[in-house]
Image: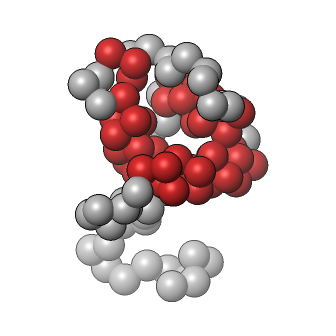
Amino acid sequence: MDPLLPRPAGTSPPVAPQVRPRDRELVEWVANATPGDKIPEPWRWASSPTRSIILTLVDLEVIPRPAPGTDLTVVVTEASAAAVAWLEAHPQR
């Protein structure tokens, strides 16, 4: 749908996910992290910090939801590049 044309009656514009400062900090951390970096709070306290970070990135639409059984190391590697691209597309206000 062309965003410049009127929307059909009863529809609303797409809503971008709300990005809290700590979520943006997480995306920045993912974009710049190297193996062995300390996971930021509060994600470090999750029972599975990596899964918690991945779910947050999915909620923020940084990465698509991985298919069941996908190797998390592949997801983490792809998430780093996706976080860089996301930050470029969503400059800080």
Q: What residue is shown at x 36% (from left), y 29% (from top)?
A: 49
| Above or below: residue 70 compared with residue 83 | below
- From the viewer's side, name the closer residue of 8 and 19: 19
Q: Is residue 15 visible?
A: no
Would residue 54 appear left or right of 63 to someone viewing this image?
Answer: left
| Above or below: residue 56 compared with residue 39 | below
Q: How is the image coloured?
A: secondary structure
Q: Position of residue 91 (x, y in %)?
A: 72, 41
- From the viewer's side, name the closer residue of 55 and 24: 55
Q: Position of residue 93 (x, y in %)?
A: 70, 32
Q: What residue is shown at x 54% (from left), y 29% (from top)?
A: 26
Q: Position of residue 41 (x, y in %)?
A: 44, 14
Q: Position of residue 52 (x, y in %)?
A: 34, 35
Toward which corner of the image does residue 8 lie, by quadrant? bottom left
Would residue 83 appear left or right of 26 to someone viewing this image?
Answer: right
Would residue 89 appear left or right of 70 to someone viewing this image?
Answer: right
Q: What residue is shown at x 27% (from left), y 74% (from top)?
A: 10
